[in-house]
Amino acid sequence: MPKIIMGIESSCDETGVGLVRLHDDGTVELLADEVASSVELHARYGGVVPEVASRAHLEAMVPTTRRAFASAGLEMSDVDAIAVTAGPGLAGALLVGVSAAKAYAAALDVPLYGVNHLAGHIAVDTLQHGPLPTPCLALLVSGGHTQLLRVEDIAGKITEIGSTVDDAAGEAYDKVARVLDLPYPGGPPIDKAAKEGDPGAIAFPRGMTGPRDPKFDFSFSGLKTAVARWVEGAEARGEEIPVADVAASFQEAVADVLTAKAIRAATESGIGTLVISGGVAANSRLSALAKERCEEAGIELRVPRPRLCTDNGAMIAALGAHVVAAGCAPSPLTISANPALPVSTVCL
């Protein structure tokens, strides 16, 4: 069984290279996690520019790889298998990572595993909290995805039970931050501003929570628009915008919907463990409200530390280790990136 797994992530604006050790008992140990972010290059545009991201990946791939091996105290020859994000994500960005992984796998004569970015966000929790109970429920909340997933086998059986129908939570954060003249990406500055505000100051809507709405789907487009209209109205009246109160009230609406639907899904499915991951999982109000509601419902809550929640190579290496341990067949060197790869396909 391969022992050292290298993971490469390049689905969006972070170039990540991670190294893990797969132990004989199936546990996975993190050895290195190096990330090069191009977020500052995109900040002027208020969002990720695919061409800029792809070029940044090209420039960062080799230096990031070198830092990872130096951090782990390993040589390239120590690698037994390589895992790479094959999708979903930005086509050009994915192509850089897949091409690099193919080159490394061919040069080292080791198996290649093209894996799912979303499944990686779940697998990364095992680096901190150990093996996942099965089944478990995963709430994946990131810039481009808001999903509720039933995980019966991290290496092979993940079922989507709910998803966003428009703006993901992270996208709503970015757009609201722009309305409030806060920096991009919007998550951290809104979270910081909200700490000084009143979450009950403004009654923003809770999307997709009506009796006729799908129980486990999400919608944050209406909330984003409601915030923009409220700010426009205040400005038209010549009022000073209470940024902290707006941020806190918006954030409360997001956290309320996410946690309520996750708890409901876990309870109705008889699942006792909830994993929250993805970049928005680092949000302080989301984690606090999730903890409170999970304790009330008797559900175990697992949230990776913030560094592991955002896109990184460690999560891909971790997923690769689980795929290897499950005996999945390696991917051919002819695999291609799939920007629309469904979460049900863990490994190509």
Image (cartoon, helix red, strand yellow):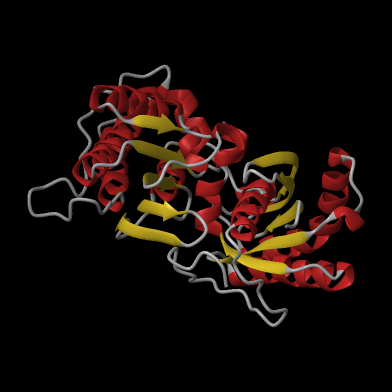
Which quarter of the image is occupied by the C terminus? bottom right
For residue 184, above or below residue 107 = above
Residue at the (81%, 50%) spot, across then down: 64
Query: Which quarter of the figure has residue 176?
Result: top left
Measured as percent of width and height from the top left, residue 194 is found at 41, 24
Query: Which quarter of the figure has residue 104?
Result: bottom right
Which residue lies most toward the left here?
211
Measured as percent of width and height from the top left, residue 108 is found at 87, 67
Which residue lies most toward the bottom here?
334
Q: Give the tally of numbered discs.
A: 0
Is residue 186 visible to us here?
no
Measured as percent of width and height from the top left, residue 24 is found at 69, 46
12, 87: nearer the viewer:
87
Q: Does residue 115 appear left or right of residue 7 in this picture? A: left
For residue 12, above or below residue 33 = below
Which quarter of the image is occupied by the N terminus? bottom right
Is residue 16 visible to us here?
yes
Residue at the (30%, 52%) spot, across then down: 221
Q: Does residue 255 appear left or right of residue 11 in this picture? A: left
310, 49: nearer the viewer:
310
136, 327: nearer the viewer:
327
Measured as percent of width and height from the top left, residue 38 is found at 70, 51
213, 189: nearer the viewer:
213
Residue at the (43%, 50%) spot, across then down: 171
Residue at the (76%, 51%) spot, across then down: 3
